[in-house]
Amino acid sequence: MRKSILLTIMFLITFIVFPFTVHANSTGFIIGDLVTIRSSKNGSSICKVLYGTNLTILENDGTWMKVIYDGQNVGYVSSQYVAEYSKITKNDPEYCNYLKGIGFPESYCPYLSYLHSIHPNWRFIASNTGLDFYTAVNEESDMNEIQLTANSTDLLNKYINAYAKNNHVVEGSNWYYTNPKVTAYFMDPRNFLIEKAMFQFQTLSFDETTDTPDAVRSIFGSSYLSQGDYVNWFIDGGRQYGVSALHLASKSVLEVGTNPNATMVSGTATNNGLTTYTTKKGNTYNIYGFYNYYSIGAYSSESNPALSALAFAGGYNGSNTSHLRPWTSRELAIKGGASFISNGYINKGQDTLYYEKFNTSPKSVYSKYTNQYMGNILAPYDEGLDMKKALANNGMLDKAFSFTIPVYNNMPIQTVQASLISNNSLLAAIYVDGKIIDGFDEDITNYNYYVLQNVNHVNVSAALSSPDSSLSGGGEVEIKEDTTTVNLTVTSAAGTQKTYAIIIHRVADDKTPKDIVSKMNVRINNSNIYDLSVGTLVSTLVSSANGVSPYAKVSVTDSAGRVVDNNANVKTGYNLVISTVSGGQASYQLSIHGDVNSDGTVNIQDLLRIQKHILGSINLGGSEYYASDVNADGTVNIQDLLRVQKYLLGSLSL
């Protein structure tokens, strides 16, 4: 689904009648999307930090807090975006025993005990997922996105390093996959057991006592949605399909916004003047005159997710009429979308915002980690906050709400939000005597490197992945034994460390590439290896070369220089690349007899190319010539043509 939340917080100064200043340090955390840290009260922006960032509160005048964030940096933050642990927890042994009796771990107790003390009518339900927490986090990899923007490249890179999996944009111009630490934090329900964040766990069935016109209208503010029949359409749709109207309203605002001219709700959107949209699969659908209030069908994989959503709204040229489609009016889109959300999620066991985002529900009819409504990892919190505000504005917070709260197996003592202080302790490359170690991977920490027996010194160096990290170890290393281990330790700015071990082996292997290929039982002419059979595996050649020289680095590359998988078939035009311990390196072009056009097979196209060469209309050279010389007699003639013809007829093997 398309995300429309911008992670930019506009500060609204809250005036307190009796301001006060607290000097005794306390602890808390950020409660907001990406919240601005400032240089002083109302001062310039230093950076933004994500929900859950831990704080030490140095001063609090009721409007602004002076805080230590990320464990070492000092700044100011609006107090409305801070939750103090002492003010959101309570020690209540009796109620904790009750909570444990209904399935909650003890670590949930301080937060739920406090919520119970201020909202005694609220009902908390432990939803045992039966899933290992770490397994669930791993399964959610590449399913959660965050929008990151900044007014400088350096600051954006800090956000990406802290919160994103990598620097690859996955949607739009600034959406990134979250890294495992951020994903784990947002999947841990305990981090959201506060009044402001609880409504992502509220059971989302329709409720006449809370899904009132005033409550729904308060979500829309002064926008066009609060006028006319819109509010009633959301309520009627919720009532008819058994889904909270507040949920529908907040989801619409989050996904589409409140602009009546937005692409998905204008009814007049076009594709650069065209009334159709062609999907990445090549299907063309009508989009003009349709509406979509929940961004349903706005797949991020499409070149234009909003137009993809309109194709969905049109029922894909009328081929699908479920959920009141085609949505040719705003009323149909609002009510039909309610049907889709209800039948696709609420009534299928994903009946909370949390479970819509992370399908780990034990009641879901869909496979775990599938059928997840939104990609935005902040969506459950943001939509829930909209619902909470609407209820609070209408004096409804003390009603008897039910909250279904997930519980996982093997949960950590706590999850800690990612820090802007880089914890990147990775290397980007390792060098021995100035030569990069082949096959380097930042996550692999042990490497074997071979030198000749007469080598007594090597120089080991490395390139850091992050400029904020530091490196120890390496340099000029004396080789005294047949095996010497060199450790390179990277320390991140946050203090995390990773050690890479380079094991230097002295070996008696001074063979050259020419020595190796001469003993491989292949036919060779200068830098060409030819007369290879159709179906020859890459692994066959690599094993043959390493059988002659176990310590040589051997690979097969394609015409673009990319390493070919060992299980693949060799094609004409591939190269056998050999690097030896003695420092020699050579590349040999490979030819499969009969595979003249280098597609890895022998077919009529190859036959025609040999025929054209014989007739003089084309001139084959290099690996193509060797592939055409099927009988390996040094010339390409009618005998080679006949052998390929017989192969194609099945009367001869090549």
Image (cartoon, rainbow, N blue to C red):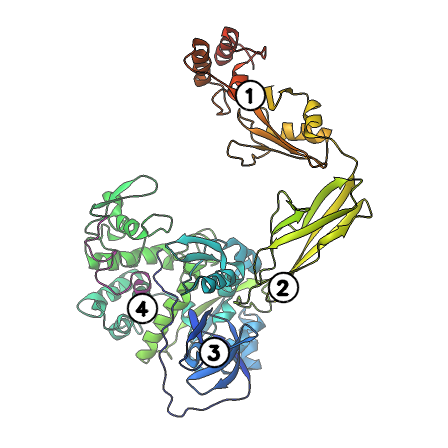
Quadrant position of the N terminus in the picture: bottom left
The answer to whether marks 4 and 3 mark residues whose Cβ atoms lie closer than 8 Å is no
Q: Nearer the viewer, mark 2 or mark 3?
A: 2
The answer to whether marks 1 and 3 mark residues whose Cβ atoms lie closer than 8 Å is no
Count residues near mark 2 (Cα–Cα under 10 Å), then give few for <14, some for 14-19, many for 20+. few
User: What amino acid type should be assigned to the residue bearing mark 1?
Assistant: Ile
Residue 564 locus on image (x, y percent): 56, 34
Q: Is residue 40 left or right of residue 426?
A: left
Q: Nearer the viewer, mark 4 or mark 3?
A: 3
Disc 3 designates what residue? 83
Q: Nearer the viewer, mark 1 or mark 4?
A: 1
Label located before the other in sequence (1 or 4) = 4
Question: Any mark on residue 592, and which?
Answer: 1
Disc 4 designates what residue? 246
Disc 2 designates what residue? 496
The answer to whether marks 2 and 1 mark residues whose Cβ atoms lie closer than 8 Å is no
The answer to whether marks 2 and 3 mark residues whose Cβ atoms lie closer than 8 Å is no
Q: Is residue 202 visible?
A: no
Label located before the other in sequence (4 or 2) = 4
The Cα atoms of the two marked residues, 1 and 3, are separated by 69 Å
User: What amino acid type should be assigned to the residue bearing mark 2?
Assistant: Thr
Residue 443 locus on image (x, y percent): 61, 52
Label located before the other in sequence (1 or 3) = 3
Part of the protein shown in magenta: 252-271
Count residues near mark 3 (Cα–Cα under 10 Å), then give few for <14, some for 14-19, many for 20+. some
User: What amino acid type should be assigned to the residue bearing mark 3?
Assistant: Ala
The Cα atoms of the two marked residues, 2 and 3, are separated by 27 Å
Label located before the other in sequence (2 or 1) = 2
The Cα atoms of the two marked residues, 4 and 2, are separated by 44 Å
Does 32 appear above or below 607? below
